[in-house]
């Protein structure tokens, strides 16, 4: 109980910091200090953990991706390409629901951390004529940005899980394919439908005359998406062992240049408008998350959680709880996969249940995704709340319910996949 109480106390400290306007980055850093002290680390050890967490290639890559995302998003919006493409899409979409979720779902195909900040301006634009509140815009953007995470083969978490379980990625997709349908259903039922309850019907779209009717505005966006897919593949082939996200960074830089080249306004005006985003504060959030993650590791928090959950015969209980808890306290898919799956798979093998590894993986992934979607540490959640000027603490209860429901949904899907084949 003391372990769970300690974790609750850590999150209470972070949420208090946010309420006191200390800033997200500083609040998370304060939470990491409390976590360190509660799990036996000295203040000196916590201080030493900071450079160890930040001076890594993983931290550099994540900060670089966040920075380039923000630059591209700002340039894409300031150059007018985003509005033109949105107008073109609006002319083809008659469904209110589809109009709101189209861009988060599309950007969700980009396997990059913090991608929700990219689709946020597009959701805001789409919501203008639907009278959807900023609170609901935040939830829609955040949830539907992640509907593919259970089955899209470019996500690093799935790739790592495939490697740990010795299951080919194609086999993993065959196992996890119902996941996006589960996420879409929960999002529609608990987030999208209530948001559109009092929304007006879409007015008839006006035809645009001449030119390309705005479709060329999608070129930078498609450059980012297709370039990221190609870039990851090239990195995996030509640069094995190094982060595939370098390909994503290159694609986003190329897409940023495309936005500038296609800008109808003067470059100086576009760059001035793009420079208004507060990039440094969001990079501070990333730094705080990495320090928190390092403290999780040095404080042996995952091992402490495993001890209180159960032993060898409780592998399914552990698969449905341990990834959730690690995902909740870290907000990172890689964290719950890397920290808990080796433990779960090893436990299955040591108890003669190797044949259940696919089921354990499936249940563990649903559980872990539930944790990160309900987590106030999730970088996409924090960045989306920041964009729409929403208090992460006040909004958290709205996102916890659909997040938690991923666990029973995952149990049902896993049972059907495992025993009804």
Image (cartoon, grey):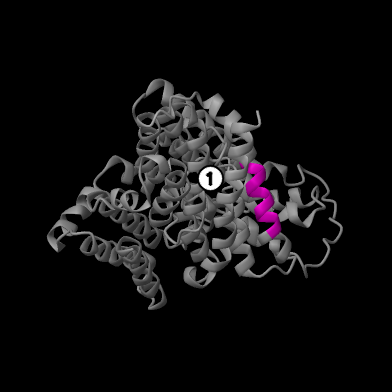
Q: Which residue is mark 1?
A: 366
Residue drawn at 34 percent across, 48 percent down: 306
Residue 384 in percent (x, y) is at: 52, 60
Q: Quadrant of residue 178?
A: top right
Question: What is the quadrant of the C terminus in the image?
Answer: top right
Residue 18 in percent (x, y) is at: 40, 72
Residue 347 in percent (x, y) is at: 36, 35
From the viewer's side, name the closer residue of 361 and 239: 361
Residue drawn at 41 percent across, 54 percent down: 325
Q: Is residue 385 left or right of residue 177?
A: left
Residue 107 visible in the picture = no
Q: Is residue 393 above or below residue 312?
A: below
Q: Is residue 114 above or below residue 2?
A: above
Question: What is the quadrant of the N terminus in the image?
Answer: bottom left
Residue 312 visible in the picture = yes
Residue 165 in percent (x, y) is at: 43, 29
Q: Is residue 186 above or below residue 175?
A: below
| Residues rendered magenta in the picture | 179-189
Residue drawn at 47 percent across, 70 percent down: 393
Density class for disc 1 (Cα within 10 Å; few <14, some 14-19, many ≥20) is many
Q: Residue farthest to the left? A: 44
Residue drawn at 49 percent across, 55 percent down: 380
Disc 1, SS = helix
- Magenta stretch holds residue 183: yes
- Magenta stretch holds residue 396: no
Q: Give the prevailing secondary structure in the magenta stretch.
A: helix
């Amino acid at each position: 109980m003391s372990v769970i109480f300690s974790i609750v106390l850590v999150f209470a400290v972070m949420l208090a910091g946010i309420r006191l306007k200390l800033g997200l980055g500083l609040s998370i850093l304060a939470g990491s200090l409390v976590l360190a002290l509660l799990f036996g680390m000295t203040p000196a050890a916590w201080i030493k953990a900071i450079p160890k967490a930040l001076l890594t290639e993983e931290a550099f890559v994540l900060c670089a991706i966040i920075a380039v995302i923000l630059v591209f998003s700002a340039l894409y919006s300031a150059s007018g390409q985003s509005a033109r493409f949105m107008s073109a899409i609006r002319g083809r979409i008659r469904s209110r629901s589809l109009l709101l979720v189209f861009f988060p779902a599309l950007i969700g195909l980009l396997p990059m951390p913090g991608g929700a900040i990219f689709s946020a301006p597009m959701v805001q634009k789409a919501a203008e004529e639907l009278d959807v509140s900023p609170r609901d815009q935040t939830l829609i953007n955040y949830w539907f940005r992640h509907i593919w995470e259970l089955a899209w083969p470019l996500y690093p978490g799935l790739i790592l899980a495939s490697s740990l379980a010795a299951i080919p990625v194609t086999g993993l997709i065959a196992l996890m394919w119902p996941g996006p349908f589960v996420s879409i259903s929960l999002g529609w039922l608990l987030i999208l439908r209530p948001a559109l309850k009092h929304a007006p019907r879409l007015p008839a779209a006006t035809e645009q005359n001449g030119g390309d009717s705005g479709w060329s505005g999608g070129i930078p966006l498609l450059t980012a998406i297709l370039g990221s897919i190609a870039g990851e593949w090239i990195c995996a082939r030509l640069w094995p062992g190094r982060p595939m996200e370098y390909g994503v960074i290159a694609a986003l830089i190329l897409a940023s240049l495309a936005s500038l080249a296609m800008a109808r306004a003067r470059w100086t005006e576009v760059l001035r408008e793009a420079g208004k985003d507060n990039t440094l504060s969001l990079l501070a959030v990333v730094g705080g998350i990495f320090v928190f993650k390092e403290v999780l590791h040095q404080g042996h928090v995952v091992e402490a959680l495993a001890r209180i959950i159960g032993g060898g015969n409780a592998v399914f209980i552990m698969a449905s709880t341990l990834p959730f808890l690690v995902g909740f306290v870290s907000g990172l898919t890689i964290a719950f996969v890397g920290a808990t799956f080796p433990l779960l798979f090893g436990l299955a093998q040591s108890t003669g249940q190797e044949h259940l590894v696919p089921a354990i993986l499936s249940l563990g992934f649903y559980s872990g995704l539930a944790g990160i979607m309900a987590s106030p540490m999730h970088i996409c959640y924090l960045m989306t709340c920041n964009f729409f000027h929403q208090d992460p603490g006040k909004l958290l209860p709205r996102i916890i319910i659909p997040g938690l429901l991923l666990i029973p949904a995952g149990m049902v899907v896993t049972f059907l996949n495992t025993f009804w084949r």
